[in-house]
Image (cartoon, rainbow, N blue to C red):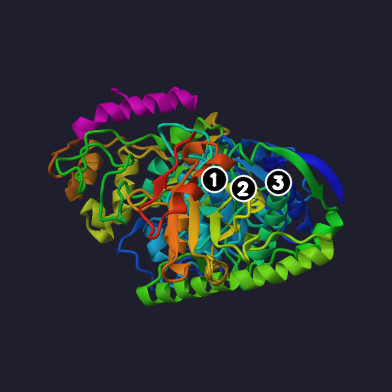
Amino acid sequence: MREPALGGMAQTALDRADPLFRKGNTNCGGCGMSNLMQMLRHAVAERPVQMIIPASCAAVAGGTFPQSTFGVPTLMTTFASAPAAASGAASVAALNGEDLRIIVLGGDGGTFDIGFASLSAAAERNDDILYICYDNEIYGNTGGQRSSATPAGAVTTNTPDGKAEQKKDILAVMAAHRVPYAASISLAHADDTLRKLHLALDLNGFRFLHVLSPCPTGWKSEPALGMELVRLAVRSGLFPVYEIFDGKRHVVNIEPDFSDEALDMYLSLQRRFQKSGLRAADLRPAIDRYWQNLRALSGRIVPARRNA
Amino acid sequence: MTVQLLSANHGAALAATLAARANRKGRGFCSGVYPITPSTECMEYLCVQQIEKGRVIRVESEHSAMGVCIGAAAAGARTFTATSSNGLAYMVENCIAAACLRLPVVLAVANRTLGPPWNIWADHGDALTLRDHGLIQFYCADNQELFDTVLCAFRLAEDRRVMMPAMVCMEGFILSHTVAQTQIPEQGQVDDFLPLTDIPHRLGNTPHTLGQIEIPHQTEEHRWQHHNAMLEVPRIYAEIQNEFEAIFGRRPADAIHAYRADDAETLIVSMGTIGATAERVVDMLRAKGRRVGSLRVRLFRPLPAEAIRACYAGKQQIAVIDRNISLGLGGVLWAETRCLADPGAVVQNYLAGLGGGDVRPEHIVAMLSDLQPREIAGPPVMMEAL
């Protein structure tokens, strides 16, 4: 039994003794990755895991030599190489008959952008890796520049008038590799998150998890509101929470109510959207189109919105 | 021991295969490979070998090829890859990472010109881009030497006192594609020569992070340790030569290869296959009564400075031939070794065979004719292909 207490956020006696992400780390307050690591600790429990981490906030949070924030053996790689290094480490584990899970923890820059070629290649080879992308929609480590995960309209340090281009649909891209499992994760929905983490840890082959990770520093939002922002993004339909098996079977896990009020709330609670003045009405058509497609893929005939 | 007709590329791959199998009772072997002319045949040959407890991963770039080796070595496996030219340039970031992480990856390099403009022929400039970052570098002149050096490179790189990547370089096509008889040892002999790979800082069960942030004085300490480990390489390599000889019955080439140099007044200094040509020129000129000798630098990093200084001693005229150019300076071998000659000696740089041009005996004779009347060294001279 590894039932989460308090929605998965609190520690229990069943947790692994050494946390995956130890106290005293240098993450900003309200960082979504810190929440993710709490959940991952629950899911991993006592299983042997190793982490592979490309240049990212997680690499900085890893601590200063010879200390280690991560409570498991961890390898820091160059920015674009985490999937390749994970392929090597997973292969050696398999050759030695070790029941070891190799987990890559990469940011959106390392996943959507610079590491994309090696990510795609590791997925194409279906190497035995659990790849978790904590997506804060920004190059956080370098002070907040645009990535291809940054949504249109968000101000970053190198798009001072707001980014013009849409966010890359990474989950669809990964599903196109026909990997055994790809899913998006809402940290505000602990049960669903833990179920997916357990499933992804248990499966073999390449598994990809996309986590929307609030970044108060980059989003210019209140640190305490991180989970609330995720909940609003999910509820409004902006961040669809679903899973894809073998690149084919699409399952929507959390039904949004497509509330414009929630979407406006999501936008207005982050100063990064202030300059472009984005409103729910601006985003709604694209969200509707996305969900219509997702409905079709998931074989559901229920329309996204009654009036859509 | 059998004798096989092999190209140097295939020889390097076969040496790596034997080394891979020798670790079957350890943590095995894992390699990431990606093709590039003229090193492609090396990875192709590796990909058709049966390796017990081994996996060769066909990746999407040289950068990832070394990335795989880093991950595999961090997991404690023996690792090898091969590349060339722009592939090596693309791999550089991870080569440096492997070195700084002190992971003993062995890398066979078929030296080729960097571009574009594209040129697939030999030039040492690709490997020399990595001279400053803590990778051992050997430059070889023939097939057997390359085969032996690859085996020695595993032993050397994985030695606890060394623990860093090793590059074994061969000029593209000139050596990589030359087929020659190569003595191939039995697997049992290689098993005796190569202990199981044991990387003390590999990821195991104890939580620790490899490659996390360092503050300046820690980096200082790590660089200094790395530098001092490199300085031990010539001495440790000599030990390895002895053990190699005891097991395989032939002695692998020295860190520097001097030929009829003891009583020479004029010395021709080079790396790689040019050294073999230089030795022919030495024989020709000795027959005419000229006291000429040759020095071929095989181990370029760490630079065996004292051995080179001892060879330079007493030589009045030294021609250093570089198949590379550090633009804005001159040949790299010349720049690094000119200070090792006696005061007043003329150490003249000749650039030859850049971009893969043939360096023939007549070129070297022409260099010596140019050198003879000189009383002081001039700027580097570009020897155009005849």
Among numbered discs 2 and 1, the one appearing first in the sequence: 2
From mark 3 to mark 1, how far is it between C-alphas? 26 Å
Q: Residue at x 47, y 37 (%)?
A: B355
Q: Please state, as top left, top right, bottom left or bottom right, where the N terminus of chain A lies in the image.
A: bottom right
Secondary structure under tag 3 reads helix
Quadrant hosting residue A33? bottom left
Q: Residues within 10 Å of mark 3 (few under 14, many from 20)?
A: many
Label 1: which residue?
Answer: B365
User: Which residues lie in the magenta part?
Assistant: A280-308
Q: Position of residue B30 (x, y in %)?
A: 66, 51
Q: Residue at x 40, y 24 (%)?
A: A293
Query: The residue under label 2 is which amino acid type?
Result: Val
- The answer to whether mark 3 and mark 1 are in CB contact below 8 A is no
Secondary structure under tag 1 reads helix
Which numbered circle lies on residue B281? 2
Label 3: which residue?
Answer: B143
* Left or right: where B53 falls relative to B161: right
* Left or right: where B311 falls relative to A37: right
